Amino acid sequence: MEGLTEMTNWAVDLIDVRKTYGRTVEALRGVNIQVGRGEIFGLLGPNGAGKSTLVKIMMTVVRPTHALGTLLGRPLGHRGKLERTGYLPENHRFPHYLTGAQVLDYYGALGKVPRTRRRAKAKELLDRVWLTQWADTKVDKYSKGMLQRLGIAQALMNDPELIVLDEPTDGLDPVGRRDVRELLIELKNMGATVFLNSHMLSELEMVCDRVAILVQGLVARQGRLAQLTERAIEYRITAAKDLADAHSKLAVLGASVDGRTVRLAGDELGKVNEAIDILRERGIPIESVEPQRFSLEDILVEAMGDGAVAPAPIARPAKG
Amino acid sequence: MQFWAVIVDSFRESLDRKIFWVLIALSCLIALVMLSVGFTGDKISFFFGLWETETEFYSPVTQMGPTRLVGAVVYFFLAALLGWIGIVLIIIATAGMFPEMMRLGAIDVVLSKPISRARLFLYKYISGMVFVAVQGAFFVVLTFLVMGLRWGVWRPGYLLSVPLLVLLFSYIFCVSVYVGVKTRSTVAAILLSIGAWALFAVVHQAPQVFETFPSLKEHAAVYHTIRVISWIPPKTGDFDYLAARAAGVGTSLDVVPMPGTGEGGAMTELDRQQLAAARDVEERQLLKDPVASIGSSLLFEAVVVLMAMWSFVRRDY
Ligand SMILES: Nc1ncnc2c1ncn2[C@@H]1O[C@H](COP(=O)(O)OP(=O)(O)OP(=O)(O)O)[C@@H](O)[C@H]1O
Ligand SMILES: [Mg+2]
């Protein structure tokens, strides 16, 4: 049993979240995710991995088959904490008969933001997402990008401590995406925690402190972005002269030789050193030894390739 | 605050509907028609005095005239136009409320707010009444004022038609909401709720058929079963009589001149008998206990609403 103080350290602490739709669709099969306060957390995964389902469970939109854990230090579904949370669902649609300003006011009121505060906040946010001129236009006249920006503004009406965004850059052009990234960093600097779903890998790489990779309803990888990408995918040794002499010896190691370059797949330093020894024995000068690091995309592809992903242990990553 | 947010949102949804304005226009038209009728002494004039004729029957200066006038408005405008066509139009206009709110991407934001699903459901249900309350109040108050200012007939009891209209609507709306929540389909909600309304009317009328044909009454077991069953559905058919009773206007046969089939429109003995029998049926309706009628209907409504709410609360979105 964790102490209460420790529980409250996480902005999001999900333990063994399971969801079976109907009798057969196992969307989530025991998910454990921890998000520290003040960080930007990215949930990554292929289509149908269960990302939206997880977020909907956090936001009480979907009822979990089984779930433990806390949101802002209180059990999932705690009203007071929902009041402190902002949410942008994927493919959101707002009532077509409302104007942009009315949308913000309506959802703000449902989020228990006092009236005078709503007025001021709506004005400020519309300005922040460049919709001031459109404030009194019905949302059925909005473009997809404008709707997405309004959706993000809606999620911020209550000055949330935790912001949950499902595909926030969906439908935005590159400039719009950059704006969202900047906004996220701004929110983080103001002390908020951001939890976002995305399949735009490059985006996550740019802003996220930590990521989890969800595959078929299980967390396949989780950790600081730097930590996940620190493993090498292969080592490249470049020699100063031709390698014909060492060819057969290197092949035994499993290395592939191409002109003056030796490539060693995997992340085994021992083999790298053996290869270096082979070269030195033959008096071949070494120009460079370079590890090729994983990109987020490589990690995702690798995680998906694992096929039957084992349930991740309920390990709590050190918070940093 | 959340309650008002839902009410205001639903009201905005109403204002966005064409049907809302069509109904307002219809009410204005009816009020205008009534306004064009005037009385001077025992003369009645139509089209703002364009055509004039003598009337003893409706003249407001006679003892029965005012009651008959209000009765004509209750039976022919309120009950027949608003109580039928108006309600059908309002059912059509409001059937989409729940399916619309429950659309994917729309319901998500709402459910993520600090409000319980049951509360949200109830707020939305209540706000469904806003449409009919606004329309009903507009029509009733407008015609009330025309009767008072133009004809000098003030009948405060007539104003009770507004809550009665809301009740009548709610009996059908609960079915519409149930179907809407279950199927998320506006069309299904419209068709099934109007179908249910027809069914209520049939079931409600069934015992009367027995009463009109005394020979059928011999099948006592069947008669009693039907009476018990007829008690279950909401008493939508009582609306006319509840409104008439509130306005104190008697049966629908009292509010129009009844020409006989005899020479020169004279009443024959047969006419008199038939009229008396018909009046007897209506009078029995008028004497029904309003509390029992409304209470049993609300009981039915409560059960349907609870079932709809249960479904709304339990499902995944
Ligand atoms: N309401 C539902 N009823 C039944 N099955 C569902 C429901 N919602 C989602 N699923 C199923 O659950 C699985 C996970 O879906 P989910 O939407 O969570 O995935 P996702 O990771 O968000 O995918 P995407 O990247 O396409 O948004 C899918 O197989 C989906 O078909
Ligand atoms: Mg999704």
Image: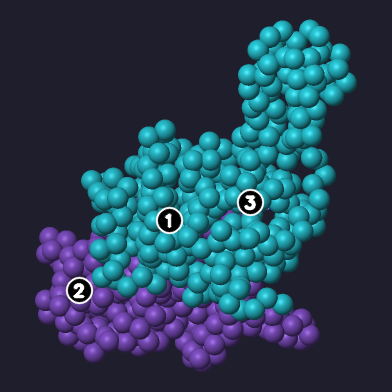
Chain colours: A cyan, B purple
Q: Amino acid at mark 1?
A: Lys
Quadrant where the C terminus of chain B lies? bottom right
Q: Position of residue B301 (x, y in %)?
A: 57, 77
Assess whether mark 2 and mark 1 are in contact (beta carbons under 8 angstroms).
no
- SS class, disc 3: strand
Residue at figure coordinates x 63%, y 40% from the top left: A229
Assess whether mark 3 and mark 1 are in contact (beta carbons under 8 angstroms).
no
In screen coordinates, is B65 left or right of A252? Answer: left
What is the chain identity of the residue bearing mark 1? A
Question: Between marks 3 and 2, how big is the CA–CA gap?
Answer: 75 Å
> Do discs 1 and 2 belong to a common subunit?
no
User: In the displayed structure, would residue B59 be above or below residue A17?
Assistant: below
Mark seen at residue A54:
none
In screen coordinates, is A165 left or right of B246? Answer: right
The residue that mark 3 highlights is: A223
- SS class, disc 2: helix
Within 10 Å of disc 2 (Cα), the crowding (few <14, some 14-19, many 20+) is some
What is the chain identity of the residue bearing mark 3? A
Of residues B236 and B311, which is closer to you in this image? B311
Assess whether mark 2 and mark 3 are in contact (beta carbons under 8 angstroms).
no
Residue at figure coordinates x 42%, y 39% from the top left: A177
Of residues A172 and B61, which is closer to you in this image? A172
Mark seen at residue B146:
2
The residue that mark 1 highlights is: A188
